[in-house]
Amino acid sequence: MKLSTYNFLTSMAIKGVKVGFPLKLTINKKEVVESEFNPTFVERMLPKLDWSAVYGAAQVAELTDDIPAVQPENIGENELLMQKLHHLLFEIDVLEGQLECPETGRVFPITDGIPNMLLNEDEV
Amino acid sequence: MHVEETQQKVNKAKKADKKQRRCLAIIKNDCEVSPSDEPTTYLAILNVGLSNGLTEECLLMEAAATGGKVIQVVMLPGKSYCFLICASLEDSQHIYEGMHNISTIGQQGAVAYLSYVKQLPANAGKSEWNKPLPNGLHVIADFVSEEEESTLLRAIGGDGRTSEVTGTLKHRNVKHFGFEFLYGSNNVDPSKPLEQSIPSACDILWPRLDNFASTWDWSSPDQLTVNEYEPGHGIPPHVDTHSAFLDPILSLSLQSDVVMDFRRGDDQVQVRLPRRSLLIMSGEARYDWTHGIRPKHIDVVPSASGGLTTQARGKRTSLTFRRLRNGPCDCSYPALCDTQQTKVPQELTASLVAQAVTLEQQNVHEVYDKIADHFSETRHTPWPQVAEFLDSFEPQSVVLDIGCGNGKYLGCNPLLLAVGCDRAQGLLAVGRRKRQNVFRCDCLNVPVRSSSIDGCISIAVIHHLATKERRLSALQEMARVLRPGGRALVYVWAKDQRKNDKKSTYLRQNKAVNKERTTEQQQRQRQHQELEQQLPNNNPLPIHTNRTEFQQQDVLVPWKTKDEQKTTYLRYYHVFEEQELENLVSQLQEVQLIKSYYDQGNHCAIFEKISKNSL
């Protein structure tokens, strides 16, 4: 699971959960898959992402020195930050770990790079 | 001149030798019959037989002209050779010398080649004609006299009255009386009787049926279809639609004999319908056997001596008399019964609601998990119109494929951030191996933030949901994750696999039907027999026969594995009627339909989430 995908995931489908976002991420095993840096791609992607989850992911991935807690203005002009975001969002691939619902503590395992978000019939 | 003539003779003899050797190789290969250098009482006629129109009569006349005496003619169906059993060696020699490379009994006057042979084929004499007729089938010879034949032909408009409803099908001319038989639906419309009812000249026929009619559902017909068959015309194997007509069906053959094929599964019986005979199809023969006429110029029929011979067809007119049923069929032959195949009983709808989750679990999720790898192999080419939809997004758009399977659409447009989800772990693993972004969930609870996605696709997914409510909530879930202005594309399998009379790829890939080796009905019948042994009887849903038209909306579709076990898994499908998808979309909140279309056997819809500003 790339951390860009993580940015969209929620546990709101669980009965009683209001927001279910951001999910609490644990990384047990990750891989870095290099990909071509395209500043436009990152810049255009940013408005679609939730910065708090971007920052949260950076914390778990131990990249807090690189990513500020608050999204800076005119971010597109900061090529270095864009490169770091590219690395965080599109190069780190979580192979093993888990996602946890912030409201109920329900755990969604990540196995072989695939988060299992499937809920049981009685949870929804 | 003299030299040339001699040369020609030598050439002719050489040609005959060559031809003879080639034909002998064929019969050796076909039926283990070897040539004999010494004369025997068995003669092979090497290049003329039933397959190229030789008649027993013609052969016997030629043989008689040589002075040789024949005991029996042995003709084999579908073969371009035949055999004679001669009375003595002397007779045999007379015939050989009188006919070999001399008799012009072949097609278009081609000369016949003969050879002595050591024995006759082992299967000679066994024939399709010794089989018993299907139950309920009767052929009454000389049902009308020649005079009555003329009267009937005049009465049905042979003299040129053409005011009746007529139409030209591919293989024959038809005319209807009483009610029009509609070939699109293979049914009649009981509310629309034709002005022209069955001609009164036909009334002479019914009293002759008193012996039979006591057990029938009717005493006189109200619908007549007249078919005119020129030599070479035929009619594909079919069963008369059960719900359209009562039992029995009567058919009067006029002007020429013909051979009709009756089939049930792998059983096949050939029935000769002589000129002026009446065919009665009742019970099993009417409901459970298909009947058809091969498009040929020549029929192979039993000969007077008990062998086979050929018979050229003439123009034939058949009068098929039927009685409308005006209601569902209640026969006890479900395999070809449209009523029983298409009926959605109240209990079924109720049980789908009650058992939707279990049904989807057993007949969708578990099956996809089991067939994942094989299924994935068959799903690699993106459908062009789906790829086109994906290309219509701005670069850097976020697109979610709900029910992404092996992820074949996730790499379609590399300028997008494409994420896929599916219920089937096995299929997700295939996508993941290609480094695609995938996660596992079901389409009713998509774990994605609301209003966060630019585009959504759902290709061949929601037809696996067992109730309308569930199909609707899957669509609502797509609408929820779309941002205002975001667009979604949905594909579902269509019940109707033809558009404008054109078959979908799904139907077109029915190779056996394409080559006219079989029909959909026969395939259904065969599968019925096959699966009956494999599956428990308490299956709540009808089982669809692949590459045939759907008989009803909620069906189980077989998937046969490629391994040696050839296990059959059944996937549940709800195939969509026309407008059904559009109707669902119209019930969604904050959504408008942009476009709907039919693409290769699928109903498709594109909808857009309405921007808050425009609400």
Image: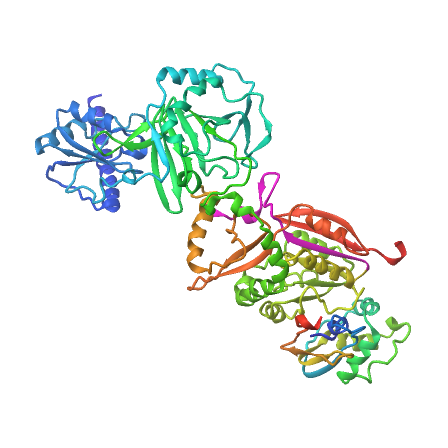
Q: Quadrant of the C terminus of chain B?
A: bottom right
Residue B55 position, x and y percent, is 27, 28
> Farthest right residue?
A73
Instruction: Please give left or right for residue B144 compared with residue B427 in the image.
Output: left
Asked whether residue B436 appears in the rendered view, the answer is yes
Q: Quadrant of the N terminus of chain B?
A: top left
A109 or A56: nearer the eye?
A: A109
Residue B173 position, x and y percent, is 49, 26
Is residue B491 located in the magenta-colored stretch of the structure?
yes
Q: Is residue B594 above or below residue A119?
A: above
A67 or B350: nearer the eye?
A: B350
Q: Is residue B179 above or below residue A21?
A: above
Is residue B173 located in the magenta-colored stretch of the structure?
no
User: Which image quadrant is residue B130 in?
Assistant: top left
Instruction: Please give left or right for residue A32 compared with residue B131 in the image.
Output: right
Q: Is residue B547 above or below residue B171?
A: below
Residue shown at 71%/74% (left/top)?
A2
What colour scheme was applied to this rendering of the protein? Answer: rainbow
B445 or A35: nearer the eye?
A: B445
Asked whether residue B315 appears in the rendered view, the answer is no
User: Which image quadrant is residue B111 in?
Assistant: top left
B370 or B143: nearer the eye?
A: B143
Q: Is residue B595 above or below residue B172?
A: below
Residue shown at 86%/81% (left/top)?
A69
Residue shown at 36%/42% (left/top)?
B268
Q: How many marks?
A: 0
Residue B507 position, x and y percent, is 54, 47
Residue B571 position, x and y percent, is 55, 59
Instruction: Please give left or right for residue B546 compared with residue B19 in the image.
Output: right
What segment carries the magenta color?
B484-512
